[in-house]
């Protein structure tokens, strides 16, 4: 029998979705972008909000319309391709980059400021405790809605609202001058900075994971599941938008407060210290710890669930342990190294996620969906890798004439052209009619 969720459960589902998205990148990148954008803050913020809020929202809605997450959305691709793609995404947002980053940012902002001589031993002990707690919460998958959505997130929201109101009511500094990186094309620069949140990747798996939570709650009707997933996506989008705008304004009013800061974490710490004094750093520690913990729980749980389904040999709990241990090990390389390594990977593979979402929405207009999906995805991947190689610093002079190649978005025009070709392809022109 199909069950309906109470209003309280629906809000809990929305808060859980919001909490899973709100993590390390969501906290440290907006203030840095706001600080560097200067007078171009509105344009840079608009670009960032598209990739940081808009793309995750439309991805979750696409998952709802498709009736599932990545495997369902990619059903027109070869099975091996979708398996490799899914595994790569889970590794990127799991033990390779996003999940370890949550522990590192939590350490940098909630413990390191209070240490007189922080070293590798302190980082190792912290990540061991952090991911140990993540492991314990993630082991019982069926209670995630209660443990995360109804307990941790309301506390997190109260803390964030308090910081946001203080930023709006009592800005602590003035607007910094615009940096060279944002003198031209601040919108595009902000758009690419939004990649760092990795939230579109996360949405591809959270859609599937949220549907599993709904099934555990007794919601079996597909239309009802889709409706609840869309509501959860809207709640998450509103929450993320509120947080981002607050942090952009924080960074955009930091001149005189955090003049020598080189990271978003340093800007927030300096701003909070100016607003609330030393006790404010304890508030900041609570905000960051909760945000990073809830996101880490979502990432580790979803990653473990996927690989359990893929292999069907190791249990979900064993995969939780494997992922938590891997995150702890990777986190010990340090935050700067992890961010540096992740940027080219995101530039290369984010276009693939965007292309899949685009193809999902356009599916009703496709007469040869198998051909169209494969063409669009192949072109996005090829030109995305080209952008990624350029981001690494490799010479790509042969492709320098491509539109937007110099700003890391050479994939856009070719992917649009491939989409038009896919939509124009008649059903009987190729094999693989749906």
Image (cartoon, rainbow, N blue to C red):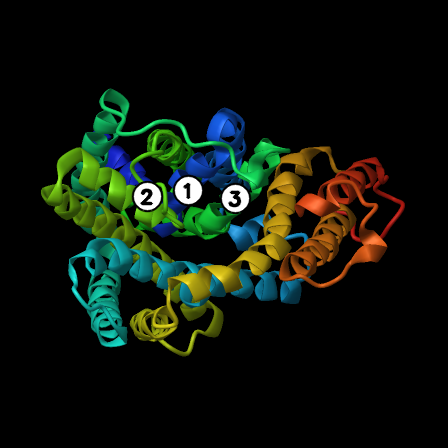
Mark 1 or mark 3: which is in front?
1
SS class of the residue under badge 3?
Answer: helix
Image spot of residue 97 (x, y percent): 44, 62
Residue extending farthest top: 169
Residue placed under numbered mark 1 in the picture: 32
Q: Answer with mark 1 or mark 3, whichever residue precedes in sequence.
A: 1
| Residue 1 seen in the current view | no
| Residue 73 seen in the current view | yes
Residue 238's image quarter?
A: top left
Image spot of residue 49 (x, y percent): 48, 33
Numbered-mark total: 3
Question: Height in image: 120 above or below 145?
Answer: below
- Mark 1 and mark 3 in contact? Answer it, CB < 8 Å: no
Numbered circle sitting on residue 193:
3
Q: Nearer the viewer, residue 72 or 248?
A: 248
Distance between mark 2 and mark 3 Cα atoms: 17 Å
Image spot of residue 83 (x, y percent): 58, 65
Image spot of residue 92 (x, y percent): 49, 62
Q: Answer with mark 1 or mark 2, whichever residue precedes in sequence.
A: 1
Residue extending farthest left: 279
Question: Height in image: 363 above or below 203?
Answer: above
Q: Nearer the viewer, residue 415 or 8?
A: 415
Label 2 crowd bin: few (<14), some (14–19), many (20+), radius 10 Å: many
- Mark 1 and mark 2 in contact? Answer it, CB < 8 Å: yes
């Amino acid at each position: 029998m199909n069950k309906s969720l109470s209003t309280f459960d629906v809000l809990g589902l929305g808060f859980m979705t919001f909490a899973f998205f709100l993590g390390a990148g969501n906290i440290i990148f907006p203030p840095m972008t706001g600080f560097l954008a200067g007078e171009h803050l509105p344009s840079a913020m608009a670009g960032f909000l598209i990739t940081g809020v808009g793309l995750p929202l439309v991805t979750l809605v696409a998952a709802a319309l498709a009736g599932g997450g990545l495997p369902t959305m990619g059903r027109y691709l070869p099975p091996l391709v979708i398996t490799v793609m899914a595994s790569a995404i889970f590794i990127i947002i799991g033990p390779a980059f996003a999940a370890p980053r949550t522990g590192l940012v939590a350490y940098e902002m909630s413990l390191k400021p209070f240490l007189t001589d922080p070293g590798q031993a302190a980082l190792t002990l912290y990540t061991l405790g952090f991911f140990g707690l993540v492991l314990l919460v993630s082991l019982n998958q069926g209670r995630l809605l209660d443990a995360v959505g109804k307990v941790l997130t309301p506390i997190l929201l109260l803390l964030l609202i308090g910081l946001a109101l203080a930023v709006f009511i009592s800005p602590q500094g003035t607007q910094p001058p615009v940096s060279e990186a944002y003198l031209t094309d601040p919108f595009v620069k902000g758009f690419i900075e939004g990649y760092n949140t990795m939230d579109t990747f996360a949405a591809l798996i959270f859609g599937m994971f949220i549907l599993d939570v709904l099934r555990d709650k007794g919601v079996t009707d597909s239309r009802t599941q889709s409706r609840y997933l869309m509501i959860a996506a809207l709640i998450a989008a509103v929450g993320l938008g509120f947080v981002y705008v607050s942090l952009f304004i924080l960074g955009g009013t930091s001149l005189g407060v955090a003049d020598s800061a080189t990271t978003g974490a340093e800007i927030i710490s300096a701003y909070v210290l100016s607003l609330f004094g030393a006790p404010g750093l304890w508030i900041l520690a609570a905000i960051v710890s909760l945000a990073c913990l809830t996101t880490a729980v979502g990432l580790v749980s979803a990653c473990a669930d996927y690989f359990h389904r893929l292999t069907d040999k190791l249990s979900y709990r064993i995969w939780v342990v494997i992922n938590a241990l891997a995150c702890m090990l990777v986190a010990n390389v340090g935050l700067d190294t992890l961010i540096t390594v992740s940027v080219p990977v995101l530039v290369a593979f984010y276009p693939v996620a965007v292309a899949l979402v685009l193809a999902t929405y356009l599916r009703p207009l496709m007469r040869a969906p198998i051909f169209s999906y494969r063409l669009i995805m192949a072109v996005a991947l090829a030109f995305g890798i080209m952008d990624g190689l350029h981001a690494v610093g490799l010479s790509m002079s042969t492709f320098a004439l491509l539109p937007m190649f110099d700003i890391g978005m050479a994939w856009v025009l070719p992917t649009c052209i491939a989409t038009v070709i896919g939509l124009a392809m008649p059903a009987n022109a190729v094999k693989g009619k749906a």
